[in-house]
Image (tube, helix red, strand yellow):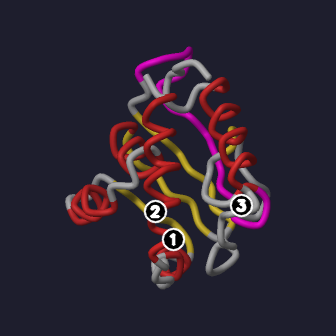
Amino acid sequence: MGRYIFLSQEWIQAALTLRDEYADQLPDPPVPVRMNLVVTGVPHGDEPQVAASIDTGVSGLLPRLGHLEGPELTVTLEYDVARSLLVEGDVEAVGQAFFAGRIRVDGDVSRIFLLQTLEPSEDQQRLAEEVTSRLIELTE
């Protein structure tokens, strides 16, 4: 696999391919969540923002380009914050960004907190670290 610009169509396809590779090992998300993402300050492409979505019932926690019809919430966040969360899994950086007002949530914010309720086993934690490492490797 090559290296791709974060949130480009190529990156999303490579991330979904990676997810498919681990599909039989990944636990189901703790709760179903349908959210739209608006990522601002995008340094590539024709538009300064990217419309994406996460539907845990379809692609787990990986984003797809485009918005869902009837999401439970919409999260607007800056490009670097999205990268910290979706590539590096840096929940602490995201928490700091949230409290600094760099993340806006419209809709049922409790859905986000429900995603954080599951405590991973040691095997799940090792798997998450492996997947994160591979996501970092494929991201420019």
Tell which of 107 and 135 is nearer to you.
Answer: 135
> Could you tell me the amino acid type at mark 3?
Asp
Q: Residue at x 43, y 22 (%)?
A: 140
Residue denoted by label 3:
55
Residue denoted by label 2:
126
Tell which of 83 and 109 is nearer to you.
Answer: 83
Tell which of 41 and 95 is nearer to you.
Answer: 95
**Residue 137 in the image, given as x and y percentages of width and height:** 45, 30
**Residue 103 in the image, given as x and y percentages of width and height:** 36, 56
The answer to whether residue 43 is above or below residue 117 is above
The answer to whether residue 91 is above or below residue 2 is below
**Magenta highlight range:** 43-58
Which label sits in the foreground, 3 or 1? 1
Q: Is residue 98 magenta?
A: no
Q: Is residue 29 left or right of residue 89?
A: right
In the rendering, which numbered label is found on residue 7?
Answer: none
Which label sits in the foreground, 3 or 2? 2
**Residue 27 in the image, given as x and y percentages of width and height:** 65, 72
Q: Residue at x 79, y 59 (%)?
A: 58
Picture quarter with the N terminus: top right
* Separation of marks 3 and 2 at Cα, in angstroms: 24 Å
> Could you tell me the amino acid type at mark 1?
Asp
Residue denoted by label 1:
123
State which tag comes first along the sequence, 3 or 1: 3
Marks 1,2: beta carbons within 8 A: yes
Marks 3,2: beta carbons within 8 A: no
> Could you tell me the amino acid type at mark 2?
Arg
* Separation of marks 3 and 1 at Cα, in angstroms: 24 Å
Q: Secondary structure at mark 2?
A: helix
